[in-house]
Image (cartoon, grey):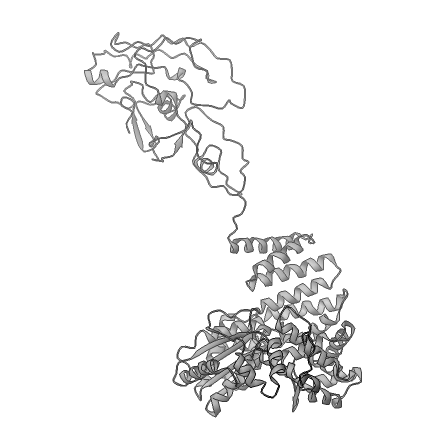
Amino acid sequence: MIGRNAEIAVLSRMIAESRGGQGNAVALYGVAGIGKSALLEEAASRAGEHALVLRATGVEAESELPYAALHLLLRPARHLIDRLPAGQRAALRGAFGEGHEGVPDRFLVGLAVLTLLADLAEERPLLCLIDDVHWLDRASLDALTFAARRLAAERITMVFAGRDGAEPAINGIPDLRISGLARSDCEQLLAGLTPEVRDRVIEEAEGNPLALLHFAGILTPEQRAGHLAPLPLQPPEPSMAGRLEQSLRATVRRLPERARLLLLVAAADGSGSLRLVLGAAQAFGAGPEDLEPAEHAALIDVSGDRLRFRHPLVKAAAYHEAPLARRTAAHRALAGVLDGEEHADRRAWHLSAATLEPDEQTSAILASAGDRAAGRGSNASAATAYERAAQLTVDRERRARWLAAAAESALGAGQLPRAAAAADRGRRLAADPLLLARLASVRAAVEAEQGIRLRPRTCSSPPPRASYGSRPPRPRRCSPRRRARPGSRATAARSGGPPASWSRSPPTWGCGWRGWSRPSAAWNASPPATPPPASPSSAPPSPWTCTPAKPPSPSQTRATRPPSPSQTRAAQPPTCLSCAPSPKTRPPARPPPPRQTCTCPPARPPSASPTRACPSARPPSRRRTWARPPAKPTAQQRARACPRVACSRRWKVGRFRWWGVCGRW
């Protein structure tokens, strides 16, 4: 080869390393016609007879057939499948459509490919050449790249070749970019032309080897003598591949009509089977003798029962040069000669290419092909089949069902934008609740995978009814069954923080919960030195009824003694519990009953008189006795409403005890 010494050296080094037990893989990238296929041929010749060479070439017509390229590559190793472990053997046979164990696991399929290649390399070194990766089906490419990334100690070299910038890309494998030839190499390749003509062809070809040979081959004798027009040899196109394809289409256009029809059928088939191409070409009246002009033009090679195009651009030129009516007729003829269950998928895709209007029968055939692809684990091919089936049907519910299946398959293949688009289209058509649920689940899975935060659920539960002396409600998570109450810590955090009137308080209940609580005037305000007399005008507004306090019983009446200085400092002015201000901020649901005037005499400071008029407040005593709290209010309400009252009672709240004298637990 001319001008590819560096690339050949890299491939030769990799082959030598694999012979020593160090497996490797590389991916060649370049534009169409740059020489990738020629490099693969050179690598096969450098491997010699001491290595086993396995080949596979991507075909555009089989790009939607799951595991088609893998089946083509592993044909020489089919006798070793029975030696695989049971799980790998079942997965690989299921991928090839030979088993009925259900959907094959993609991990087991890739592991079976690696094991099969390793068993094959035990006999002699192995060289795997995969050309036209951009036309491989996704399932085969995933299995091959899975094996290529794990060739650590195997005598295997895998070389992939694909167009630069074409999808799908190969991840995790070193790549080698193929550039155009240098000017000296181009002059060596066009040594038979005059300098003026050679410079003009090099300028037009831009270093592309295939363009150099093609442009030099189409020159007329006058042009070879130097009589070139000032205009370019070919009309300007956005890329060299486009200009080269236009030139190849002009070459195909000069062939006889029957030869063009044969090339069209061969390009539409893509499998290279000469028997199949000739059988389909009989519908156009073409025969084997019509292949001779295409062979003389160096467009195809015929050997045995195989028909191969010299370059993929030649096949593209032969297909796109024909009008639409002839292309659809060629696909319909190929679908007619493909019979048998093993060709069901190919027949379905040929019928799809031949159908331009909605057709329920073709739609059902494509849906069955999608079911088979999904059953073999090829989600990408299944999604394509379901989408095409949805396009060819006119029934609204059936189209929504196919779109739902396409969305689920695309989600399984990891194609999130495609799954979201199919789910959105199906949601606009579906009316079945179960189908809508399937589409919604796909959309939710896509948003979860993409990291989209869902819109928070708005709590619309009514606020809890406040009660006298009740503590703030416990925080609850917002869920369809259990929502956070307004005023809780969860609601405060979701709304940006608690109100300004709230305060971060220490533990105020037996549970020890620290959280946001509403402040109480009786808690935070300092007690006055001399409490004002209780009167209706000065009484705080409270919806609760103030009942007169009962006089103390004879058992409760006892002689008092002057308090000690410590008790005098700790004692606070007594306050009537029934008249204490309520921390409640919201009005009750029902209108409160009319308030009554408190008949309790005004409280006096402890220093003025040892007696107290309010029976609820008792003098501090060193002897702390148990006392049963009254029925109304409860112990918790009394503790919340009047924590600083100077009484000797202690109320038992849960497992904790509250001392009214010092307010401690």
Residue that appears at 35% across and 24% down: 639
Where is residue 127? Give x, y as percent. Answer: 48, 84
| Residue 344 seen in this snapshot | no
The image quadrant of residue 279 is bottom right
Where is residue 574? Give x, y as percent. Answer: 32, 14
As displayed, is residue 398 above or below residue 29? above
Q: Residue furthest right?
A: 285
Quarter of the figure with the C terminus: top left
In front of the other: 250 or 79: 250
In front of the other: 345 or 279: 279
Where is residue 461? Give x, y as percent. Answer: 54, 35
| Residue 225 seen in this snapshot | yes
The image quadrant of residue 16 is bottom left
The image quadrant of residue 549 is top left
In front of the other: 191 or 537: 191
Where is residue 6? Give x, y as percent. Answer: 46, 80
Residue that appears at 70% across and 89% down: 296
Residue that appears at 34% across and 16% down: 616
